[in-house]
Image (cartoon, helix red, strand yellow):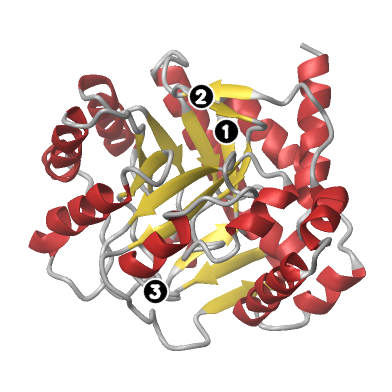
Amino acid sequence: MRRSLFQNILWTLPAEVAHNIRMTLLGVVGKIPTGKWWIKVCHAPRKENLEREVFGIHFRNPIGIGAGFDPNGDRLEELAATGFGFVEIGSVVPRPQPGTPRPRIKRLRSSDSLIDNSGYPSRGLEYILNNVRHRTDHTRDLIIGCNIGRLTASHREDTVKEYLRVFRNMYQYVDFFVINISCNTASKKFVPRSHEEILQLIEPLFEFRRGQLDYRPILLKISPDLSWEEINTVVDVLIETPLDGIEAVAGSIDMARKSPGAVTGALLTERAIEVVRYIATKTEHNYPIIGSGGMMEPEDIKRMMDAGASLVALNTGVRENGLRLLKRAAKRIAQREDNK
């Protein structure tokens, strides 16, 4: 996909600097009286056959923004105006954490990929709560997902309490949750792989949800580096528990080789689609899957949905190829629906 002039300018800058400039400019435009209208005109898909009903939630289209793009929920109004079907904030952690020292995101120019060693920088739960607590006219209909992670400096035995604290406090303000069991962009990796480890994390969340009047779907986000046996373990947990679905996949530590961090972008495309297809086949397409990882072009998104994804969550594709990826991908998916 050809990049715009603006995107080509951003591409000459370090990856994190370029993204911060984009988000700042998006916020500036959003504050202009007609700014959000202009964002909508430029970026929002116009096709009407893109609506989806997934885990009991109505999505205006299946293309969303994944965790890490707007981690603190600072640009929800502007991202709503772009027309994305949902925005996944986070990873949300209980307290502010700065992440690793800059530069911490490396661009692999020859492969249209990134190595993310950011360590999940976050302004913390209280700050993010202030951003999502009061919906405005612009965000009232926006579907918001909350990706829950862990503090990189905490002890492993504290993880259950950290996840539960975020879950309980965010419960009434977001529409669904993604429990990140692939925290892999920090020096202390956290990728639980056994049946017991995963159950220990999610059972307290189910217990809390059972006492609530409103139902919030819970999904697991998994690593692309899991073996097929380990993916089978995740599928077993999905079938045996009240989990609502899977998000596949996060970045890959294995592909980064000796570099710290995790690979995202085009190097991840084939593995991400392969994992989604495997889970969809293994579960006989009975459980929703959010496809993430490696979707840089409209055709990648179409292939991900053909593999069995109910929704897709973009991040690196928009960082590297711009917001216009949404409209072009929506057009490609609409053609796919028309041809069914």
Residue drawn at point x = 79 percent, y = 69 percent: 32
Residue drawn at point x = 48 percent, y = 63 percent: 71
Residue drawn at point x = 66 percent, y = 71 percent: 23
SS assignment at label 2: strand
Give me the C-alpha separation between circle 1 and circle 3.
27 Å
Closer to the camera, 209 or 187? 209
Mark toward the viewer: 1 or 3: 3
Q: Earlier in the sequence, mark 2 or mark 1?
A: 2
SS assignment at label 1: strand
Closer to the camera, 152 or 35? 35
- Tag shown at residue 311: 1
Q: Is residue 26 left or right of residue 227?
A: right
Residue 207, given in percent of the width and then of the height, sits at 13, 34
Give me the C-alpha separation between circle 2 and circle 1.
8 Å
* Image height of 96 relative to 236, above or below: below
Q: Earlier in the sequence, mark 2 or mark 3?
A: 2
- Tag shown at residue 127: none
Residue 293, given in percent of the width and then of the height, sits at 55, 49
The amino acid type found where label 1 is placed reads: Leu
Q: Circle 3 is placed at which residue position? A: 123
Q: Circle 2 is placed at which residue position? A: 54
Closer to the camera, 299 or 149? 149
Q: Residues within 10 Å of mark 2 (few under 14, many from 20)?
A: some
Residue drawn at point x = 91 percent, y = 71 percent: 5
The amino acid type found where label 3 is placed reads: Arg
Q: Residues within 10 Å of mark 1 (few under 14, many from 20)?
A: many
Q: Is residue 265 left or right of residue 201?
A: right
* Image height of 192 relative to 92, above or below: above
Q: Is residue 13 left or right of residue 165?
A: right
Give me the C-alpha separation between circle 2 and circle 3.
30 Å
